[in-house]
């Protein structure tokens, strides 16, 4: 068994782990990132693509936003479609000039991996059997196997950035965490298609056949979703059926959706989940390891990066001054924003998806909410400021 040491051992090389590693490197804090998948796998995984202004600013200020600034598409509004009409929500006008940027999470991950490897900081892919130990001690350990050898990493602090299915959260002793969750009776079938987007802005469509979303990744790539069941069998969705549903649900008089080759497809179930607190002694959870939102509010990635910004500042303060005030406040600081995003994501989800039983009372309520949000300045402003992201705390 080889034993090495670091200040912060980071489990998971998703956006949370990689951004944390980057921010700590700028503070002169040593980190090791351990990832159980291959670099190819995580660089190919298609994920979300809507980034809040404040998160763009964070990455740019940290020197990780060069390509994001060059290739990201700034959007100042979104459209809500219902009852056969589209209504624009002018996000920037309503939210103090702030905007969103369309740039794939996968691209952020690629940028951060490149920067880290160029800087020569440790980032190990394909590690096996990761486990965490000694959480009750001053020197917790991460054990894993790398290139066939057992290794042990002694840490001052462990950051659990290993997503919802990771090992860190389940290693916390029973009785410490309170968990809150909601499963939704639907999922999204998402495709990436090689065709120019048919609308300039994102379109969130309420339709009697179910929700649909038109998004994009670039001027040549469309990203589209249709509501389906959480365990939908992709084999039952040949290309023609996917395009038919998208045409029907997004269709409008005088507008058609341009079709193209489908490059990627997948089904995601929808869930809300929060664990409290986001810390146990020297183990700090960040991102999907601590909370999940349904994608309707486009908040998952943004929340993950907000967590690690708070954590990086707290760790830097601790390392400089010995003060644990930031670390002690970490969970409460993050959870305030997490719950705000949970509420917004739940609210968007329940307003836009076809209810399981298509209860006419629920549908009338949805349409009433949509009319209110697209006709009242106050209601539209509330949507806009949540969508572009609340101010950083
Ligand atoms: N050991 C090492 N790495 C692990 C382990 C493990 N036991 N379990 C999971 N991982 C890795 C995963 O392979 C993944 O690369 O941890 C990483 C977690 O990354 P994400 O799931 O992307 O989570 P996070 O970084 O918190 O980013 C949140 O990602 O899932 C989306 O919608 C979510 O946009 C949000 C963002
Ligand atoms: C996406 O482009 O993948 C996307 C956009 C908006 C969402 C969710 C996903 O709400």
Image (cartoon, grey):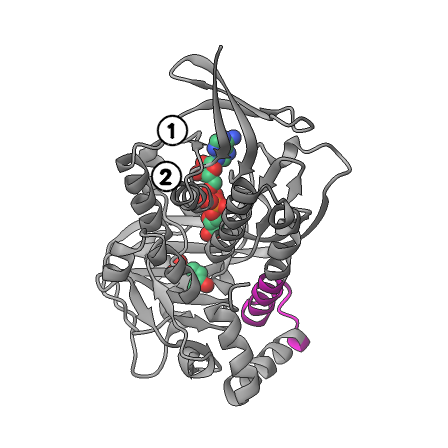
Q: Is mark 2 within 8 Å of ligand 1?
A: yes
Q: Is residue 143 above or below residue 2?
A: below
Q: What is the residue that sits farthest to the right in this orientation?
A: 175
Q: Quadrant of residue 98?
A: bottom left
Residue count near mark 2 (Cα–Cα under 10 Å), binned few <14, some 14–19, many ≥20: some
Front position in the image: 306 or 235: 306
Question: Which residue was labeled with disc 1?
Answer: 125
From this view, report whether residue 362 is shown above or below residue 315.
below
Of residues 18 and 230, the one drawn nearer to the viewer in this rendering: 18
Which residue has dot 2 on it? 42
Q: Nearer the viewer, residue 13 or 281?
A: 281
Q: Which residues are magenta?
A: 340-361
- Looking at the image, do the residues carrying marks 2 and 1 touch, with CB atoms under 8 Å apart? yes
Q: How many marks?
A: 2
**Does label 1 point to a residue whose CB lies under 8 Å from ligand 1?**
no
Identify which residue is drawn at 30% across, 46% down.
111
Indicate yes or no whether the magenta region holds residue 213: no
Q: Residue at x 21, y 61 (%)?
A: 220
């Amino acid at each position: 068994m080889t034993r090495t040491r670091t200040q912060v051992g980071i489990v998971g090389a998703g956006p949370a782990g990689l951004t944390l590693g980057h921010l700590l490197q700028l503070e002169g804090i040593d980190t090791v990132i351990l990832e159980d998948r291959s670099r190819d796998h995580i660089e190919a995984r298609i994920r979300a693509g809507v980034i809040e202004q404040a998160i763009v600013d964070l990455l740019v200020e940290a020197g990780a936003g060069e390509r994001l600034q060059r290739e990201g598409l700034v959007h100042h509004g979104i459209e809500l479609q219902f009852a056969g009409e589209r209504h624009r929500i002018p996000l920037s006008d309503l939210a103090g000039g702030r905007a969103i940027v369309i740039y794939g999470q996968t691209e952020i991950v690629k940028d951060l991996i490149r920067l880290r490897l160029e800087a020569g900081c440790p980032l190990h892919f394909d590690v096996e059997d990761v486990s965490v130990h000694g959480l009750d001690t001053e020197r917790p350990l991460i054990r894993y196997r790398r290139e066939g050898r057992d290794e042990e990493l002694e840490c001052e602090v462990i950051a659990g950035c290993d997503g919802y299915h990771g090992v860190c959260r389940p290693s916390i002793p029973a009785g410490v965490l309170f968990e809150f969750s909601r499963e939704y009776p639907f999922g999204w079938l998402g495709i990436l298609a090689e065709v120019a987007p048919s609308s300039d802005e994102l379109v969130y469509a309420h339709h009697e056949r179910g929700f649909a979303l038109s998004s994009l990744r670039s001027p040549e790539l469309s990203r589209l979703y249709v509501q389906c069941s959480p365990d939908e069998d992709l084999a039952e969705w040949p290309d023609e059926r996917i395009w038919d549903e998208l045409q029907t649900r997004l269709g409008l008089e005088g507008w058609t959706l341009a079709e193209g080759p489908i490059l990627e497809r997948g089904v995601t179930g929808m869930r809300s989940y929060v664990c409290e607190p986001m810390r146990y002694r020297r183990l700090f959870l960040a991102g999907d390891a601590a909370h999940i939102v349904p994608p309707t509010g486009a908040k998952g990635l943004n929340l993950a990066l907000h967590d690690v910004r708070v954590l990086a500042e707290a760790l830097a303060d601790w390392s400089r001054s010995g003060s644990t005030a930031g670390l002690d406040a970490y969970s409460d600081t993050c959870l305030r924003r997490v719950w705000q995003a949970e509420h917004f994501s739940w609210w968007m989800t329940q307003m836009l998806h076809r209810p399981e039983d298509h209860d006419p009372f629920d549908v009338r309520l949805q349409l009433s909410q949509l009319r209110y949000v697209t006709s009242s300045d106050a209601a539209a402003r509330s949507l806009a400021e949540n969508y572009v992201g609340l101010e950083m705390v």
